[in-house]
Image (tube, rainbow, N blue to C red):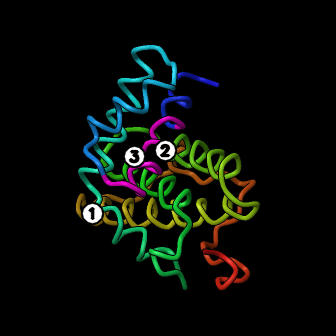
Amino acid sequence: MSLRSKSREFAMQMIFQWDSNQQTPARLEAKFWKSAKAADTTRAFANRLLEGTIKELAVLDPIITKHADNWKFERLSSIDRAILRLGVYELRFSDTPFKVVMNECVELAKKFSSEDAGGFVNGILDAVHKETASAAIKADGAQPTSNAATEQPASTPTHATPDDPASRS
């Protein structure tokens, strides 16, 4: 696992913790790093992702809600919310390529959430990416071009609606 992947995993875990007891990022980081061991650069990137995600929640949560078809935000599992917040934050507020964000978040969902979470996360992040890319094209007046960094992975489904919304909590 790369250092950046490990940073995202740590950031997702801290976002998950923050969701249950909304303390300041500095306090959460201090407690988290007492038990988690990582290189300074890994810690710094994870902390930056946590702090940025928390700072931008007022922007991120409505975006997730908009694209989580047939789901109320509060009904999403805490782990799925943490992964989606992290992914949407990176898509909207960093220069990390779409494919990297998508693959990392889908892997986090497969590792930490339910069997169907990978496809669910994929569908929402893909919809957010397409909306963001479309808005950027309209703002620039440019025509879309083929860019490997923005193409969706072919091996994962694209729909964000689960088979049975009542079964997810």
Q: Name the residue under label 2.
A: 12
Q: Distance between the residues labelled 2 and 1?
A: 18 Å
C-alpha separation, residue under disc 3 versus residue under disc 1: 12 Å
Q: What residue type is labelled 2?
A: Met
Closer to the N terminus: mark 2 or mark 1? 2
Foreground disc of the pair 2, 3: 2
The residue at the point 45 percent across, 75 percent down is 73
Which residues, given as a range, are shown in magenta?
9-22
Callout 2 touching callout 3 (CB < 8 Å): no
Q: Where is residue 156 in the image (x, y as percent from the top left)?
A: 71, 58
The residue depicted at 66 percent of the width and 85 percent of the height is 166
**Alpha carbon separation for disc pair 2 and 3:** 12 Å
Label 2 SS: helix
- Residue 59's label in the rendered image is 1
Percent of width and height locating residue 90: 39, 46
Residue 90, numbered label: 3
Image point (39%, 32%), residue name: 31
Tell me which amino acid carries mark 3: Glu
